[in-house]
Image (cartoon, rainbow, N blue to C red):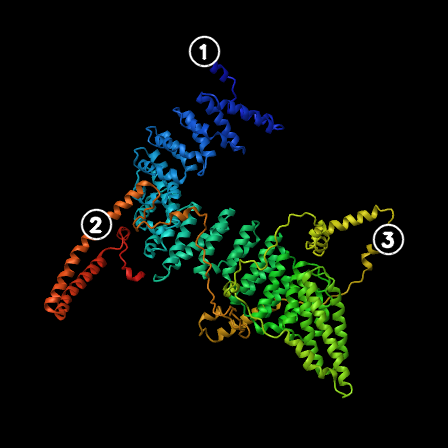
Amino acid sequence: MALKKVKGNIERMFDKNLTDLVRGIRNNKENEAKYISQCMEDIKQELRQDNLSVKSNAIAKLTYLQMLGYDISWAGFNIIEVMSSSKFTLKRIGYLAASQSFHCDSELLMLTTNMIRKELNSQNQYEAGLALTSLSCYISMDLARDLSNDILTLLSSTKPYIRKKAVLMMYKVFLKYPEALRPAFPKLKEKLEDPDPGVQSAAVNVVCELARKNPKNYLSLAPVFFKLMTTSTNNWMLIKIIKLFGALTPLEPRLGKKLIEPLTNLIHSTSAMSLLYECINTVIAVLISISTGMPNHAASIQLCVQKLRILIEDSDQNLKYLGLLAMSKILKTHPKSVQAHKDLILQCLEDKDESIRLRALDLLYGMVSKKNLMEIVKKLMLHMDKAEGTIYRDELLSKIILICSQNNYQFITNFEWYVTVLVELAQMEFGSKQGHVIGAQLMDVCIRVQAIRPFAVSEMAQLLEVYSSTSQFTIMQEVLYAAAWLCGEFANELKEPETTLRAMLKYKSLPQHIESVFIHNIIKLFAHVMQEYEAGGRLEEVLELCDVIAAKLQESVKSAELEVQERSSTSLVIIEIVKEELAKTRQERVMESEDPLEAAEETVAASLMTLFSGELNPVAPKAQKKVPLPEGLDLDAWINEPPEESDSESEPEVMDNLFVKSDKLEYSRSERYHPEPTEEELRRSREARKYELQNNPHYLKGADGDKNANDNNNVDNIPVAEIDLNVPLKVVGQKRSDKYLSMNASRKKTKKKSKKKKHKSESSSDEENPAEGPVVEVKRDLELPEGATLSDSDSSHGHVDDPHRALNIDLDLPPVYETTSTTTKVEAKEEEKKVKKAKKKSDKPKDAEKKSEKSKHREKGGGDAKKAKKPKKEKKEKKDKDGKSKSKKKPTSGYEEALGISTPSKEFQ
């Protein structure tokens, strides 16, 4: 036996340990997979040995390989075997491997319950701490239920090392087994006043995490936390406590009055930026909760805003972001305090960090008013010219539209200015998605604001004349979608509908959804043009226009897109019918010497206009959901029964691609969308083309090239013409928004002069509502199905995968026992028996009283019995009144007395 032991020890001298494994992997970088597979075979051989030290060495190497991404779940039994070792050095290796490889759904965890319980009850504090640390990584619901009492007893341990780990471990137990929260809460409350600062800090962390879901349970702990906040010097614990108070203050506004002073002192005294930020956040939450029924805390708000300005001006990007984030919270309740720092927010738009620029944009969204809307939008548009990156530019554009359209265009006083801004945005370079956003906004403005339709339609007509045949940019094409729709829908607002119609007929290579809208609205415009020609009797021009439209539609009928084919063929049939009716009318009315176009008025023009009668109104976003389901309609049922699968394979393969788009079609469609090249790409392509032409022997250069080059070098011979800079630059088809901005500025100056003459008799309430032009009515009614109402029924009830959902337990309510184990079943049955016995005892005297009342009623009659019942009722009412008065005199909660809150509760109801 001794010889065998010696032999084994000698063999172990040549085994590879973890250091050798790491060194070998570094030396075999080219054949790493082959080397590791060889090491795996050696490890499997070592795990078959009886010596635990050998197995622990193998498990240590497996732990390292698991960190490299290799699966070691096959060694689960060996890991549990090493965990059960009596030596602490080997046990530690096993628990480390378990914490990395085991998870809460592992089937092997049922084998570890008794072993972990033994470690928790060990006299060695490091063995118990090792078990607690490892258990937190793979605890399951069964382990939490079975070991909750053992971990709970460790909270009373004499060693602070164990108490601290047990407190932290209880939070993991609560997540898996929420029923343990109720019996553990008293002991957890005691740990908040533990003499050891580590245990105290751990208890604060656990309570703060528990309060994330149901902070109402922890209002009774307010005095303890208030004492810790005023006495502790640990910044990290103060941050947790202040966060907790921020969650408790909305539930009890009277608590906020006590917090303002200490939080203000911390803001003045602390130099830690993290603590300063949390203090400001909690002060904001406090001021929001006590804003009703409390005096104005303007000094506290100004202090917070000044400190946040320091954070925003700091060079640290993280602090700057946090400052902007906290400033947005103040903006919701005290916008005037933040609007004073508008220049600082605009400076953040020039920051290199994109996240800070986006946060500054969010702040500007809330700082807008009727007074400063034009100014802010102008600065954002100037910033857009300098901005880099398509993602940020797209976000900048969408934010401009959100700023202007918020609350149904609440802050817009001049809609001509807004339409001009949208047209200018459409002419800038953006991503393909932003054209749809601009187009939808143009359509929404025209539908809601009836007074802006003439101006908007004229702008859209100019866009169609300039860009319908030349636009190759996807953003302008999407805007042309809206332009064509608006000119067709509100054609009666056009001054020259025929010009717009002929401009729309010049479209080339548009996407199919835009081309189909062009075809549809061409017919609308044609109907309005016919109405204008009726008065003049211009039959020949109508027929000529029909021929032009028909020729264009003949091209669209051959399109590969189904919708374009359908719309163009339908429109072509309508044009042919119009031509036939006009021809018939001309032949029939020639003999009577009447105007054929006037005679055809009732049959052609009026009939054509009826196809597009009616006015479109804005539709509610959830209107489709509100449509009631007709009786007898089953949306899940098949309309046509699916065909049975045939076993025959004799069908030709050619039929498989009958209804499938070919690759050529996809390729031809993709060729239509040409992204706009950048300036750098254009410069490179020009240089490459010049270089290719210079080196091309077949390229014939001009003989006068040198002579022209020499002539161009004579700068003195170039004539110089004087330019009158006083004449403003005018671009056809484009309205500059600067004109409206200058008009707004001049109007403000005249207002200031008039106010000085009136000796400032009027209040400053007009600042937010400046009279800029006539009052425009905006349609705010949304169309819904009959009987439906606008409501936000889609309320979110929290994320399903949120681990804190299980902690939403009201500790004031009695526990509800579940039949998950035998012990809970027995306890539930015993309680049911006790309740039944108590009910029987209380029912016996009532039965005796009823019998006595019945006998009295028989002896004295019904009238005497009624008189006898009256004093009993009066006694009961007196008892109820006394009980209510006693309950009123009782204090509502103990934390009010501890914090010195003496305000009666009626003020805060």
- Spatial CA span between label 2 and label 1: 75 Å
Residue under circle 1? 3
Above or below residue 70? Residue 262 is below
**Depth order, front residue of 239/513:** 513
Q: Quadrant of the C terminus?
A: bottom left
Q: Amino acid at mark 2?
A: Lys
Residue under circle 2? 837
Can you tell which quarter of the image residue 534 is in? bottom right
Above or below residue 15? Residue 622 is below
Q: Amino acid at mark 3?
A: Gly
Q: Nearer the viewer, mark 2 or mark 3?
A: 2
Residue under circle 3? 705
Task: Give coordinates of residue 864: x percent, y percent.
Answer: 12, 69
The reply to whether residue 742 is in sight is no
Mark before the other along the chain sequence, 3 or 1: 1
Mark before the other along the chain sequence, 2 or 3: 3
**Depth order, front residue of 90/20:** 90
